[in-house]
Image (cartoon, rainbow, N blue to C red):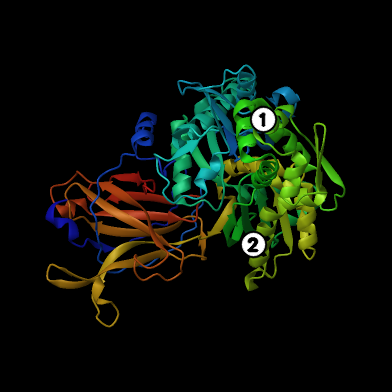
């Protein structure tokens, strides 16, 4: 960038009152990159070199809210993928009958002979690290290999989606571990999973229809509403690597999707939600996370978000983890590790059995609950340990609460329910905090959805804790997100407004004022005193933003070839400097402008569009009138 790097860019504001169409505006992975480009990015983490500081000078800038309407989907088919922590599945419907949702009926759970509407989120790789299978097929194949002692070198990845929950340090080089601790790039594992689901869907579509091709499909992938920009970009890039065209891909927020579906369900309870003015809290409990939103039904038929999405890692998989921890306390870590390594078939069956058992646990369950103890686990324990199992039970303080008779583990219901209490207590406390806010006083309804929301214990607890609310649990609560995502794909404008999770802005220079600005922020530019690192705010955390809210900045570059714009977010509503506590640089824009012979020929408008499920950015070169989409590169 030469010596011009620290010169301020001049800017002013203009507005457009047209929201970008879904086919015109792209995000994270839309800078004319092909699948091969993303593959290279995933492996090497390459990105453009950037200067350390490209400040902007603030002249006149105002915000303007524009709630532009988008057209309904013009695609013949919408296919939605619910890519979950523990289970995944897909559903579809056709444009001429969008509410006739077709779910895949052919997931078969192998040894259990169980036909399921979802399949486990797990991937099996061959020893050469090529994809072999996904879901029940992957678990069953690995089990068979384990029984024949031929599983060595094979890699089985399970429950890896939670890698995107804590995104600090998330990059294209982030890795996930298989059941034996072997690492692979997370981007590779995610894209393999999505490719399998996509291919499975396309094969099913071709069998059902004539004259419909893959290019007639609008894809939708569900993501937790609490995910940040970094995690959403990661998922989008993985989807593009899997073969989904980015311009035909939407991300749907999971609690929103469930809420959208329950607007059209015809049972009496769900019809209450569809009344104009209805305000309700959506509690979406999945395998990994609890995702919580608050919605209001508008006279237009749209939904408006009333509270920023929130939640935490309080999903059903943590109950499973507590069960395994209990077994580890009794049998010892060495026994469980060896059992898992040598008897993977039994270890997978153990998880499947527990999944079935935990669904039947109620808040008023009494007596003991019976679980199977595998002979191999008992034999390994006897081989490793010198004391008896009864002594182990006494040592962990569970004497009288747990007994072992033959191949049966009998666990007191109080112990089993305690495995639920950690995640459920955290979730209930969080929901109570939300409902205690003054602006939430009119929220009288609660919608409980998600796979973990089907747990009888969870349902009992929610009704008990929120007796003053009308708790609605739709039939097939675990499919509400998936079906709603299909409807969202047909009508993405069904959400009219969302509440910002963060304050967003960019870094600029202002005239230095010794009474306002600390001396450490003084910077001399072309002989003028400037205050550096000033946070130029676009939108404010907690504010209600209509879908299509635009902020446009006009800039004169100081470099002939390209401009870098760092983008920041803050957890507070009024950050002053981008270095304030709680401020984070989420990524940066790269604007290439080779056209023109002077800097004035390269003046451009950059427009940020808020209020959607992702942050969209577009640019327009004023001299050449070239328009193009931009990516905020959030992945390191």
Q: Secondary structure at mark 1?
A: helix
- Write the residue at 23% across / 52% down: 51
Q: Tag 2's secondary structure?
A: helix
Count of residue discs: 2
Taking 603 as reference, is 457 left or right? right
Q: Is residue 183 above or below residue 205?
A: below
Up/down of 507 relative to 20, above or below: below
Would you name the residue on which mark 1 appears? 383
> N-terminal of the two: label 1 or label 2?
1
Instruction: Say above or below: 546 vs 227.
Output: below
Residue 332 falls in image quadrant: top right
Kindly give the residue lying farthest to the front in the view shown.
Answer: 386
Q: Nearer the viewer, residue 113 or 206?
A: 113
Residue 430 tag number? 2
Tell me: residue 504, above or below residue 104: below
- Spatial distance from mark 1 to mark 2, Cα to Cα? 45 Å
Front of the two marks 1 and 2: 1
Q: Residues within 10 Å of mark 2 (few under 14, many from 20)?
A: some
- The x, y position of residue 434, in whole percent, is 64, 65
Note whether residue 362 is visible.
no
**Image quarter for residue 62?**
bottom left
Q: Residue 628 versus residue 115: which sits nearer the camera? A: 115
Q: Decide which of 310, 219 is in the foreground and name it.
A: 310
Residue 141: x and y in percent read 62, 21
Toward which corner of the image does residue 162 lie, by quadrant? top right
């Amino acid at each position: 960038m030469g010596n011009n790097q620290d010169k301020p860019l001049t800017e002013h504001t203009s507005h457009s009152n047209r929201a970008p169409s879904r086919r015109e505006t792209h995000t994270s992975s839309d800078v004319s990159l092909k699948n091969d480009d993303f593959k290279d990015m995933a492996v090497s983490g390459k990105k453009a070199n950037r200067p350390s500081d490209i400040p902007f000078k603030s002249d006149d800038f105002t915000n303007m809210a524009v709630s532009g309407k988008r057209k309904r989907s013009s695609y013949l088919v919408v296919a939605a993928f619910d890519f979950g922590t523990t289970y995944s599945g897909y559903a579809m419907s056709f444009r001429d009958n969008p509410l006739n949702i077709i779910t895949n009926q052919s997931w078969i759970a192998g040894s259990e002979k169980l036909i399921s509407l979802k399949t486990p989120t797990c991937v099996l790789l061959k020893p050469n690290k090529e994809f072999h299978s996904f879901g029940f097929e992957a678990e069953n194949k690995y089990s068979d290999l384990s029984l024949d002692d031929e599983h060595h070198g094979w890699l089985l990845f399970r429950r890896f989606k939670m890698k995107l929950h804590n995104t600090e340090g998330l990059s294209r080089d982030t890795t996930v571990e298989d059941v034996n601790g072997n690492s692979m790039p997370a981007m590779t594992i995610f894209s393999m999973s999505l490719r399998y689901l996509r291919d499975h869907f396309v094969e099913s579509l071709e069998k059902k229809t004539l004259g419909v091709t893959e290019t007639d499909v609008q894809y939708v992938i569900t993501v937790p509403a609490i995910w940040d920009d970094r995690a959403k970009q990661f998922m989008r890039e993985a989807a593009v690597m899997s073969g989904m065209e980015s311009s035909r891909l939407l991300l749907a927020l999971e609690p929103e999707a469930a809420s959208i579906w329950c607007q059209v369900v015809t049972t009496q309870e769900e019809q209450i939600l569809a009344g104009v003015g209805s305000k309700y809290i959506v509690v979406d409990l999945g395998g990994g996370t609890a995702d919580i939103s608050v919605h209001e039904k508008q006279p237009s038929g749209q939904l408006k978000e009333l509270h920023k999405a929130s939640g935490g890692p309080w999903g059903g998989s943590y109950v499973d983890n507590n069960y395994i921890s209990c077994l580890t306390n009794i049998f010892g870590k060495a026994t469980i590790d060896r059992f898992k390594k040598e008897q993977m078939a039994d270890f997978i069956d153990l998880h499947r059995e527990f999944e079935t058992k935990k669904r039947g646990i109620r808040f008023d369950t009494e007596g003991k609950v019976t679980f199977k103890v595998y002979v191999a686990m008992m034999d390994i324990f006897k081989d490793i340990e010198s004391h008896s199992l009864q002594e182990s039970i006494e040592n962990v303080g569970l004497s009288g609460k747990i007994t072992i008779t033959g191949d049966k583990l009998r666990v007191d219901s109080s112990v089993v329910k305690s495995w639920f209490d950690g995640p459920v207590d955290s979730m209930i406390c969080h929901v109570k905090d939300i409902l205690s806010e003054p602006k939430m006083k009119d929220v009288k309804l609660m919608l409980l959805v998600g796979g973990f929301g089907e747990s009888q214990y969870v349902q009992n607890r929610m009704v008990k804790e929120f007796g003053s609310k009308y708790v609605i649990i739709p039939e097939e609560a675990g499919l509400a997100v998936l079906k709603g995502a299909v409807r969202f794909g047909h009508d993405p404008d069904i959400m009219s407004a969302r509440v910002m999770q963060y304050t967003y802005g960019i870094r600029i220079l202002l005239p230095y004022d010794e009474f306002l600005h600390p001396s450490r922020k003084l910077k001399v530019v072309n002989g003028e005193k400037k205050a550096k690192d000033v946070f130029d705010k676009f939108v404010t955390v907690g504010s209600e933003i209509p879908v299509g809210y635009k902020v446009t900045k006009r800039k004169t570059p100081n470099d002939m070839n390209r401009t870098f714009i760092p983008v920041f977010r803050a957890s507070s509503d009024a950050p002053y400097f981008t270095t304030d506590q709680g401020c984070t640089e989420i990524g940066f824009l790269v604007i290439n402008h080779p056209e023109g012979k002077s800097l004035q020929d390269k003046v451009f408008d950059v427009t940020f569009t808020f209020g959607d499920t992702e942050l969209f950015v577009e640019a327009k070169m004023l001299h050449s009138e070239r328009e193009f989409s931009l990516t905020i590169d959030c992945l390191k």
